[in-house]
Image (cartoon, grey):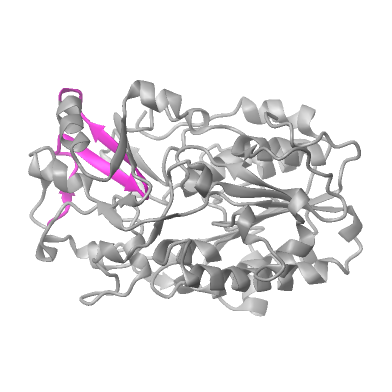
Amino acid sequence: MTDSSIPETSEPTDRTIVLDVVGLQPQHIDADRTPTLESFFTSDSVRSLRPPFPAVTVPAQTTLATGQRPDTHGDVSSGEFDRERQTAEFWERDRDGRERIWETGTDDAGLTTGVLNFQHLIGTSADVAVTPSPIEDENNDILEMNCWTNPDGFYDDLREVLNHFPLHNYWGPGANEDGSRWILAAAHEAIEQFDPDLLWVYVPHLDYVGQSNGPGSDAFRTELSVVDDLLEEFLAPLTETDRWDETALVLVSEYGFHDVDRPVFPNRALREAGLLETDADGDADIVGSDAFAMVDHQIAHVYADERSVEAARDVLESLEGIDAVLDESGKADRGIDHPNAGEIVLVANRDAWFQYYWWDDRENAPPYASKMDIHAKPGFDPCELFFGDEGLVSLDASKVSGSHGRVDESAFGIFGLGGPAAPELEGDEPVDATDVTPTILDLHGLKGTLSMKLEGSSFTRSGE
């Protein structure tokens, strides 16, 4: 571990439950808005958590679950650009050799492990796992709701008790607390059926209002109470179980939010400069382009052929709303110098974020732009949280009021230890995201046994 505020554990705990509450920060915990969290995680047991760069979903999750930075584990965005196929895709990967704490815990330490709704779980060896995996047609339209689970029949069991996973409440214009409520109820069923020694539960509820309304909004403050109620429904029954006295709770958040009011459009600038081409359907012709920006909230990876890197840099450096244009040295300084990263990486100003649009006139937008199509879009699209006038999804980027990706102290996440088997925290310095997995291993008395295995593991993308 790199942070002295986390003590070495003298007596291993028998059970750890990780609550991954996206968007939560230390200042959000108090007796008025979040009394449940305050009762389990006192001010002395909570610290800020410094996320990796970039502070977006997949890089942050992989760092939390492996103890590695993006320059080692290779997840540099929530999407991936396949250089061989010249395609940019989001949320499309399976386990692909990942060795995260629940895999090493199950495979190498004999722990019973569980994880719910983390990204890229398909194929995991965790004893119990749940991740949405709807059955879709060739146009990415949902034919039937489904979840991939380990063991195979666990989703059937969950359906009998909870009905189908509410995918349309998990993301999109209808996103609300029902997705998180279902996940936490499924976590309760996982404990009832499998009683895992390590259980990691992803709670996304604050992510929606954090992006749509921003962290400084009245709506965000209201939803803090909502997520606290959801956690009370999950935690209260646990305190009555036989294993409660041997349970440690770990509270984490992958990132905090920035209030934003400026969308930035790097692909428009690249198109206007003749570096990005489009096809007859209005889609980006990535194969035929000299440069393309794969955007993800407040960061953007610009992939360019060797002869066009400097031209792309010249174009993008003049855009308003960009705080930094990272070259190889800049990427190394921020821990993102990995072959998966773009030739150039853009960082937005604190009040700005990147949208993938390359068109000015809505009539020239590709067909999927106004649809809920998270896989087809070659960039993350927070406008999917808003209903559109001409389709399901809005094309008005000015509606987005919150974003993340920059690593600023004001938008650090949270780390907390609670429950009867948790040690006390020391000091008051922020905890680094790379310390979370070593801390959990130490709670179980396994840090020396398994941390070297995690530190030595890495994986690459297709096309490298």
Q: Which residues are magenta?
A: 282-307
| Residue 47 visible somewhere in the drawing | yes
Question: Position of 136 compared to 101: left or right?
Answer: left
Q: Residue furthest top?
A: 329
Q: Residue at x 88, y 66 (%)?
A: 241
Looking at the image, how many numbered discs can be counted on the residues? 0
Q: Residue at x 63, y 50 (%)?
A: 414
In the picture provided, is 282 more to the left or to the right than 154?
left
Residue 333 lies within the magenta run: no
From the top left corner, tell me how far across and down residue 323 is, in percent.
32, 38
Residue that appears at 29% across and 29% down: 343
Of residues 433 and 133, which is closer to you in this image?
433
- Residue 303's place in the image compared with 223, above or below, is above
Q: Position of residue 279 (x, y in %)?
A: 10, 51
Tell me which residue sits at (77%, 32%) in the image.
447
Rendering coords of residue 72 (x, y %) = 51, 28
Corner quadrant of residue 204: bottom right
Residue 177 pos. (x, y %): 55, 73
Q: Quadrant of the image for the C terminus?
A: top left
> Looking at the image, which is closer to me, 117 or 31?
31
Residue 91 appears left or right of 220:
left
Where is 231 relative to 96, above or below? below
Looking at the picture, does residue 258 appear above or below residue 155? Answer: above
Is residue 301 located in the magenta-colored stretch of the structure?
Answer: yes
Picture quadrant of residue 273: top left
Choose between 94 and 266: the one closer to the eye. 266
